[in-house]
Amino acid sequence: MDQVGVLSERKRAILSSVVLLTVFLGIWQLSVKTPTPGVKAEGLPGPVAVASRAWEMVSDPFYDNGPNDKGIGIQLGYSVRRLSIGYSAAALVAICLGVMLGLSPGLYRALNPYIQVLKPISPLAWMPLFLYTIKDSSQSAIMVIFMSSLWPILANTAFGVAGIKRDYLNVSALLQLSWFKRLWKVILPAAAPAIVAGLRISVGSAWVAIVAAEMLIGGTGIGYFVWNEWNNLQLTSVIFAILLTGFVGLVLDFGFASLAKTLTYKE
């Protein structure tokens, strides 16, 4: 397909998305019951009410009026901070261990049964143990992120390293490269597409897990904000926070998708 055809296809896709969104918002707004004066509104608020509340929150996102009254920007900042710490630690451990497993089939066979047992466990199932041992709710949430991010990165890294052509490793051995140079110049670049794919999968899992974990630990974070606003029956705030959470996840996924395209190479 030529470039003109690609652009035309993209325009049609964008137009279709806009039309679907407009129809959805229209149906949503029409389905909302008009509140009776003096009577508390029932049911979900419409998109107009949500947009009005969203504008109020983004106009002053960093206010701090105490433990249970913080701006949406502050709450989101706590979540992103926890995500960054737990995700970075998991990526470091998983990539190192994945390289070892990918280069050593015997070690992979020895550890694979344990990996298969631990991988299906929900990250939130670890929360009670983390709370009991660490005795800090925020650090326990970070450990939940760590557990949710570990397995996709580990599996993809091991798969990518194991799939490296032996010719590459033989040439590096022939050139008498040190182990670290071989890792940095041959192994990691060759396995980079698979590693980034694992990073992309795990960041989505980690973002889902942090919201759920923050609902449990309370205090701060976008997950706690959603739960606290629900307790206050502020459904407009809840809906906006849900949409904001999805938007942040979209941005994270788009970033790793762009990185994956950059690292993709053709032989």
Image (cartoon, rainbow, N blue to C red):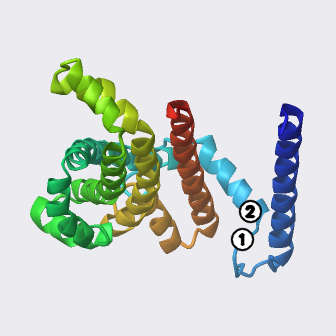
Occupied quadrant, residue 20? bottom right
- From the top left corner, tell me how far across and down residue 198 is, in percent: 41, 50
* Residue 49, label in figure: 2
Residue type at mark 2 is: Ala
Q: Is residue 64 visible?
A: no
Along the horizontal axis of the image, is 36 left or right of 90?
right
162, above or below 68, in the image: above
Element under disc 2: helix
Q: Judge by depth and name the residue closer to the eye, 164 or 185.
A: 164
- From the top left corner, tell me how far across and down residue 164 is, in percent: 35, 40
126, above or below 153, in the image: below
Question: Which residue is located at x 39 percent, y 62 percent?
Answer: 209
Quarter of the image that includes the N terminus: top right
Q: Which residue is mark 1?
A: 45
Q: Judge by depth and name the residue closer to the eye, 187 or 118.
A: 187
Occupied quadrant, residue 146? bottom left
Occupied quadrant, residue 25? bottom right
Question: Mark 2 Cα within 10 Å, few/some/many (few <14, many 20+)?
Answer: some
Distance from the alpha carbon under mark 2 to that under mark 1:
6 Å
